[in-house]
Image: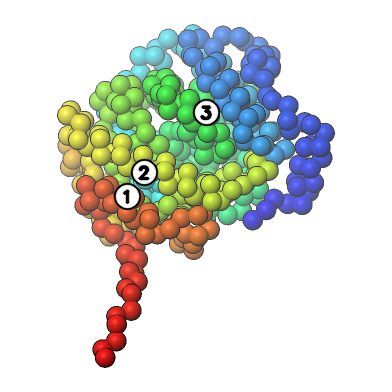
Amino acid sequence: MSLPATLRLADRIAGASGFLQRPLRPAALVAQAVRRAASADFGDIPFQEPLARLLEACAATSDPSLVGRIATRWDVLRFLGNLLRLAHEDTRDPAIRDEPIRQPIFITGLPRSGTSFLHRVLLEDPANRAPRVWETIAPYPPRTGADRRIAQVDSQLRAFVRLAPEFPGLHPLRATSPQECSEIAAHVFRSLRFDTTYRIPDYRRWLDQAGHLEGYRFERRFLQHLQHQDGATATGAPRRWVLKCPDHVFALRDLRAAFPDARVVFVHRDPVKVLLSVAKLTEVLRRPFTRTIDPLAIGRGESDRWLLGTQRMREAADRAGFAAPICHVHHTALIADPLGTARQVYRHFGLALEPPAAAAMGRMIGRHPRGDYDHDPYRFADHGLDAATEQEKFRAYMDYFDITPETAPPRTRHPALPQAA
């Protein structure tokens, strides 16, 4: 599905004028954020190099549309503004840095494997807490005037849906929905979220080499700020953080370094069943922001990317000292018995699932027995993939975790037998 004609015309005009070819300059964006905040104090948060790498990669390979350039600029200024506010709040109230983030649960696995569904089920327990979409976009209320953050974020999401009308069927999202961790790490420009939205292989290679530790350290600080606003630490025990992002599989060592007591849940599913949906989601997310879309390259890239992800999961399951805390959930079991799967997670980590929380989970499951996702009417050829090749490619992952295939094996064509004389 293409962009509206008015936006396509604006793209042509902006491209012909050379506007889209002018790179965004980190120093200019930082200066503008500082003017808006009337503060130049970013504290001790390291963001300069990753910001420069991101903008360099966007200029080199993303071929931004007019919407893409505006969105990148808006994103960067928003993140920088949030960093300045966070540093200000740290100075104003040093107790924020003492907020305890104890034994957070991280849900991860292949995209489209049921991680979002499991996340939403667990969040029916009032003892659990997740960052919401509106909190990751605007973590602090305005200093003056009414707090309209939820309404403003819902308006922003509606605007995005007008640009990407297929998005709600692939990933339903509201301001109050739980948000993925990648949106938090994006504040310090160390997030694979950018690699999904833009075609920036240079940035992805740099981040793979540089690592995600600083992103996770920032996430801990971000959670401390949200938790401090809850006020629960002062009055009693804060709620348990339950966090989710498929991209965690690429950075499990860094996650463990920043959160030594983290509890990790792997959700497993037949990769062949999810790859087309993952490729389609990436295509839908990128389309408003770039002038060139290559579905075949997206398909091949997502297949290779998540093959690496499955290898990282196998390594973590094998690693001494890492395997014990991991709870393994299978998509087939999750869909067959969501409440039973929630009980499995609680048992694995020695947690008590109180009857009122279990009842709330049951009611939510009754309303959304399989989550809110459309079926996947996509063809392998649309993204340059072949079912038989992908089945063989991911066989080691399937066998290692004893994953039930959801796709029939391809038929083998036998040569014609010779006829009897």
Question: Which residue is the extreme one toward the bottom?
Answer: 421
Which residue is under mark 1? 394
* Element class at badge 2: helix
User: CA gap, disc 3 to disc 2?
Assistant: 19 Å
Label 1 close to label 2 by CB (< 8 Å): yes
**Residue ID at (47%, 33%):** 192
Residue located beneath label 2 in the image: 307
Lower position in the chain sequence, tag 3 or tag 1: 3
Element marked by disc 3: helix
Q: Which amino acid does label 2 sit on?
A: Leu
The image position of residue 189, as x and y in percent, is: 52, 25
CA–CA distance between discs 3 and 1?
26 Å
In front here: 174 or 78? 78
Count how many numbered circles sit on residues in the image. 3
Which amino acid is tagged 1?
Phe
- In this figure, which residue is indicated by the disc labeled 3? 203
Label 3 crowd bin: few (<14), some (14–19), many (20+), radius 10 Å: many
Which amino acid is tagged 3? Answer: Tyr
Identify the image quadrant of residue 291. Answer: top right
Q: Earlier in the sequence, mark 1 or mark 2?
A: 2
